Amino acid sequence: MIERLIKAAGSRPRGKVRRWPLAPSVRRLRMMLLVIAIAFSMAAGRALQVQALDATAEAEKAADQMTVSRPLPAIRGSITDRFGDVLAYTEPTVRVIADPMMIQTNGKFAEKMTENDKQKAAVAPGLISEILARHLGGEAATYLPQVTRPNSRYVILAKKVSSATFQSISSEMTAAKLIGLYRETAPTRRYPNGTLASNVIGFVNEEGTAAGGLEVALNKSLSGKDGREVYDSSPNGKIPLGDYVLTPPVNGKSYELTLDSGLQWQTEQLLANQVRIGNHIAATAVVLSVKTGEVLSMANYPTFDSNDPGSGKAADLGNRAITSAYEPGSVQKVLSFAAMLDSGLITPDTVLTVPPSVKSGDFSITDAFSHGKVDMTATGILAKSSNIGTLLLARGMKKEKLVEYLRSFGLGQRTGIGLPGEGTGSLPGATMPDYTRDSVAFGMGLSVTAIQEAAAIAAIANRGVYNRPTLIRSVTAADGTKTSADRPEPRRVVSPKTATQVAEMMEQVVANSVTGVFTVDGYRTAAKTGTAYRVDPACKCYKGLFTSTIGFGPLEDPEILVYVVVETRTKAAQARAPCRPVYADILRLALPRYGVPLSPTKSVKKPLFG
């Protein structure tokens, strides 16, 4: 070959064309050929390395570039009420995602676009925008900037889209031979009843994070365990015959609550109406099954919609029935009298001379009703809610014994109901000053939560046996296996005789009511009211009141307990007693709803004064 080149070079025609010396031309040709030979050698060596020596490593690298790994979220378990009505469930929705670069290049990233590709890519954004508008709503012009966003491969077009809707979008894309849209599984938590029991249930936000209520408390078991799919992918999507590995998700457990959604709704409406007409701050109601401790209703107002928690106020997203601690006022006298009766200190007929006032520490204690020196029975002291009579009787009881009884009723500790943020309230120790003991006896100097006080008084209704309040009836696993929830062992706190005596003393509150506001036609019931000053967190001073009413029925065999607490702005609300009509209305609804038989006997007034 070299000889022919030399010969050809030597046979060039002569003339005015400049001639190059022969030797330099030959050297240049030789150098050029040497460079070409080296280049071919290097290419051949690299091919040998890739195809033979490093074949496995290179294949794994290529596979990694083609492999896509996506999580498969588990379906969160549902929450239902005691009758199976759905309170929270998960809808299998998706996010619709656009890949603008894929749309703009017709999927040709590494290879050159043909004229046909360019034509398709030019019209694709408009066509895709029209498809999106048809199925997702809105105008095509709204989606166009999103599907043409420069230098982007990930744009969220819509959230909470049903799987069926995305399937329709996908089918139309396929028919039009368009690419660049895909979905991400993103289940949406739904609360079909909006505000109903929202303070108990809580909510799950858009990121899938549980926030508040049972959603947080049961989050681990509700969530289940996510799965994963790993598959081979190309610029045009999943490769049909490529590798595919599926780890299926394990769906979360579902919970049946003790709540009665119908009674819950009625309770919430009654509370809301009372707060609005009285311009009160807030209200709470707890309805318990006396014999089991099951919470039939736990209502709060103001409240929020679990589907849209962002529209609610921060103060209303919690559950006041378990978090708000307050002085219980005269409702506490029920427990004080139970302790004194059970310890043998008094009987219902014990007569005490009650003065118009009494000194306690640096304060002079009076009663809410004006009177001079008067003889009253223990029943009368409770029924008329005499602070003076109560503290004078309680002074005959050792402080450590009183504290022991109150703790056995669950005060000063969480009930363990299983909701986040539950408060303990506060209960002074046995070394409390005498004036604190006086205050505790008639409902000041300590604090409780609504669920604590409801459970404590329910022990009186339940013939002296305390049941820890519960919200869970049963649990259903992903495979459909249903098991009853564990129930804590009940405990006796006072004797059956004591409990019956206290209940009959409470009945006199109803029997001696002039207005008849506590009366539930056809049933003998027991009730007690409470009023205590409210501590305003802004000024850290007393401002407004906590008023409350608690009661149960029927007296012969108690089934249902209702406790209503209203937080008022001013002391003037005391005269209006906002809790009483709400309490009675709830009890009137609950007793017949659960088929509780009417009382076979009528209540009898007992002497209140000696």
Image (cartoon, rainbow, N blue to C red):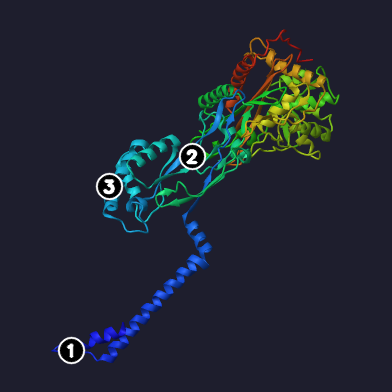
Where does the image place residue 370, in percent across and percent down from the top left?
69, 21
Residue 78 x/y as whole percent? 57, 32
Mark linked to residue 310: 2
The local crowd at label 2, few if under 14, some if 14 to 19, many if 20 or more residues have their Cα within 10 Å, is few
Residue 182 screen position, x and y as percent:
42, 45
Residue farthest to the left?
16
The residue at which mark 3 appears reads as 123
What amino acid is at disc 2? Gly
Percent x, y of residue 45: 46, 72
Tell me the element at label 3: helix
Among numbered discs 2 and 3, the one appearing first in the sequence: 3
| Upstream in sequence: badge 1 or badge 3 | 1
Left/right placement of residue 338 relative to residue 316 reads right
* Disc 1 packing (10 Å; few <14; some 14–19; many ≥20): few
Local SS, label 2: helix
Which residue position is annotated with label 1? 18
At label 3, the amino acid type is: Val
Type of amino acid under label 1: Arg
Front of the two marks 1 and 3: 1
Q: Quadrant of the rendered structure where residue 520 is?
A: top right
Which residue is at the front of the view, 34 or 132? 34
